Amino acid sequence: MRRFLLLILVLAIPFPLFAEEDYITRRNGFMIIWESIQRATYEPYKEDIVDIGNDEYGYEEINFAVGRGIIDEKNYFRPNEKLNMEDALLWIFRTRNIRDLFFMQKVNIPGMLSDYPIIEYSDDFANVYVTIKDLNGLMYALDDILMKEIHEVSYYADDFHGNGTAFGDTFDMYALTAAHRTYPSNTLVKVTNVDNRKSVVVRINDRGPYVDGRDMDLSLAAFEKIADRSNGVISATFQRLGDEFMIDTCTEDILRFQKRITRNVRFHRGIPHMWNKGETLYLGANKYFVVRSIQYPDGFVHKVQNWVGPKERFSFTPEQTGYYKFVIGNKDGRSREMGMMVRQCEVVVE
């Protein structure tokens, strides 16, 4: 079952319960938080942190988070120091995008905890350190609250059809997309109408809505999946699934990727173990790599020999079902074989 189905029932963690030992490091703590949201780092990321080598665990994720303002540190992250409660709370709230980033600073922690009481506030959080158990408890408690929140949802259609979105897409009122004020671009969200329990999975590709009290605008097609157009506005819950490149759009399961080509050459996402026929796979890495060959399910071997730079992407769209083999190499002549099973996504029509 998906991680968000394993949420604990506790909505607040009493301050005295935090352990006195086995504290988690800042690097490991951030990576646990980051991996819980299933957000990709396929976009270019800033390389500001100087105390984490580019072949070390968490390098690209932490640098990406610095560039996005999720982490405040600009030069020294102090990866092996103990993680304190102040930073843990900021990172958890910011990765969940509960507010605009400008309103998620250290001075805003009391207000955020007032809205989302996952722990009793203390003005000494900078000197309180957390364990893995503590960190998981905080995340699960917040995710549980967020999944139960009721939101006002409407739609947009004809007047915007064909216009550009805030993220550079062309708005298509017949596609399953949505506008949200804080969710990152390409986030998949399951929206459930609380009145009839009908759900639709949408991709965030625009900013908005800009009406007081309203939390999401669905495309017309998405809205009509869960309500009559004449309703205009509905009440709904949101279930954030993750980045569209990290989630199987057919099953809504978390995708698992083969990321490492060699010790120092890593894909931003990588080759998935499972993929869907007709969906395009994009490959990019932190250093130059070459796609030497691709073996198709029918045995045909395509000699590609395509070199890809750090700012480039190699794309591949499988048109057959079955098992594919990729041979990927680096500039030193080393190669690795990676396999990918491609299936036909069976869409259930209600």
Image (cartoon, rainbow, N blue to C red):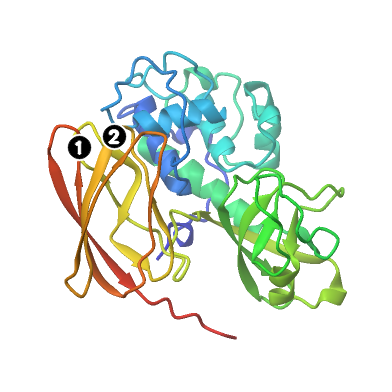
Q: Earlier in the sequence, mark 2 or mark 1?
A: 2
Please name whichever residue, 53 or 76, is drawn nearer the observer in this view of the structure: 53
Expressed as whole percent of the image width and height from the top left, the position of residue 201 reads: 59, 66
Expressed as whole percent of the image width and height from the top left, the position of residue 86 reads: 53, 25
Tell me if 271 is positioned left or right of 158 in this view.
left
Kindly give the residue lying farthest to the bottom in the view shown: 350
Expressed as whole percent of the image width and height from the top left, the position of residue 235 reads: 77, 65
Tell me if 329 is positioned left or right of 19 in this view.
left
Q: Can residue 157 be seen in this view?
A: yes
Distance Cα–Cα, label 2 vs label 1: 7 Å
Expressed as whole percent of the image width and height from the top left, the position of residue 284 reads: 36, 42
> Where's the N terminus, which quadrant?
bottom left
Q: Pointers 2 and 1 in contact (CB under 8 A)?
A: yes
Q: What residue type is labelled 1?
A: Asn
The residue that disc 2 covers is 288
Residue at 48% from the left image edge and 56% from the top image edge = 7
Quarter of the image where one finds residue 106? top right
Could you classify mark 2 by the number of other residues whose Cα lies within 10 Å: few (under 14), some (14-19), or many (20 or more)? some
Please name whichever residue, 265 or 246, is drawn nearer the observer in this view of the structure: 265
| 73 is higher (above) or lower (below) than 151 | above
Q: Residue 330 carries which label?
A: 1
